[in-house]
Amino acid sequence: MANIENIIGKIRLSQGEIASISSARKYLEQIITAKGNFMQLPPPKELYIIGSYKRGTKISPLDDVDILYTIGNVRETSPNLYSIIDCAFTFNSNYLDTENNISSKKVLDEIKSELASSYSRSEIKRNNEVVNLYLTSYNAGFDIIPAFYVEFANIYLIPLGSNSTKWKKTNPKIDEKILDVLNTKHNQLLKNVIRVIKYWFRKKKIKSLRSYHLEAIVYHLFTQLNPITTYLGGVSLFFRNINFSNYLSSCPDPTNISENLSSDLTQADIITITTEANNALTKIAISEEEFVKYVDSDI
């Protein structure tokens, strides 16, 4: 009989995918470190895997991994103003914006340019707050995110994105911890529930939220709920509760560090999601097998 474990087995990352991304990551970090040694890029103080891969909610295929590239430490000198206190790289006038602050956009552009010289056959682009590098030889991609660590505040400044020169506050390491705590509360089932929901979006061809926004919604919904005991129960609760929140358009950042997460979903997109969620609940009411067949007819 088909059950949700069948879906989870199908979307779980394979050892081959993990090994491939590990090799590609190791070489990328060597490139960045070497360029840092020659001051072509800021020497990395830390290269740290973040995002859904690190949080354990990524589904196959493993086509992108986020890397936090910490380029220096800063200290807040007045509200939203920071001074560099530990950085081996000198940011000359080419890196400054019109207000003589370090431009996140120019930092991203320099990372993109330097990586392009080492990965001439790869696709490299700046995409909002990241530099996206796709390696066809590994069938894997990386999103590289430059950051300053704010001492005594336990936060990072990363590019604001949307063609802005500014920086925004975040701490992805806190995201990892709070999801781990919530997953423990829900009997170690919640991360796989998130994976199934992501797969549901993909298979039903519904416009999905960004991964972090979706996981933020799950955080807010399941923080308030009693521990789940089955995958089906968790998936059902998500579909049932998503209809009664405004989280699809705007959702508070679970860490309370960043501003609310805003989606680019239209009202029509939101109606499609909630309508399909009700369809999913109808299938769940019949049986787990019926739900699995509805999500993935080839199982």
Image (cartoon, rainbow, N blue to C red):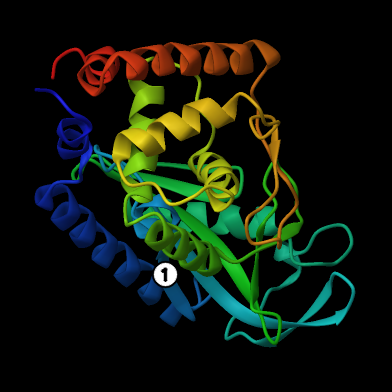
Q: Is residue 51 above or below residue 273?
A: below
Place of residue 73 in the rendered image (x, y in percent of width and height, measured from the top left): 64, 82
Looking at the image, residue 265 lies above or below residue 5 = above
Residue at the spot of label 1: 48
For the image, the number of numbered tags is 1
Tell me what residue is drawn at x 57 percent, y 43 percent: 221
Q: Looking at the picture, how far across and down is residue 7, in whole percent?
A: 20, 31
Image coordinates of residue 181 in percent, x first then y, are: 45, 65
Q: Is residue 296 above or below residue 169?
A: above
Where in the figure is residue 286, as x and y percent of width and height? 30, 13
The residue carrying pointer 1 sits among few (fewer than 14), some (14 to 19) or many (20 or more) residues within 10 Å by Cα, namely some
Element type at mark 1: strand
Amino acid at pointer 1: Tyr
Left or right of 173 in this view: 253: right
- The structure residue drawn at horizontal position 23% and vertical position 54%, both measured from the top left corner, is 21
Q: Examine the image and state in which quarter residue 1 appears.
A: top left
Q: Is residue 222 left or right of residue 190?
A: right
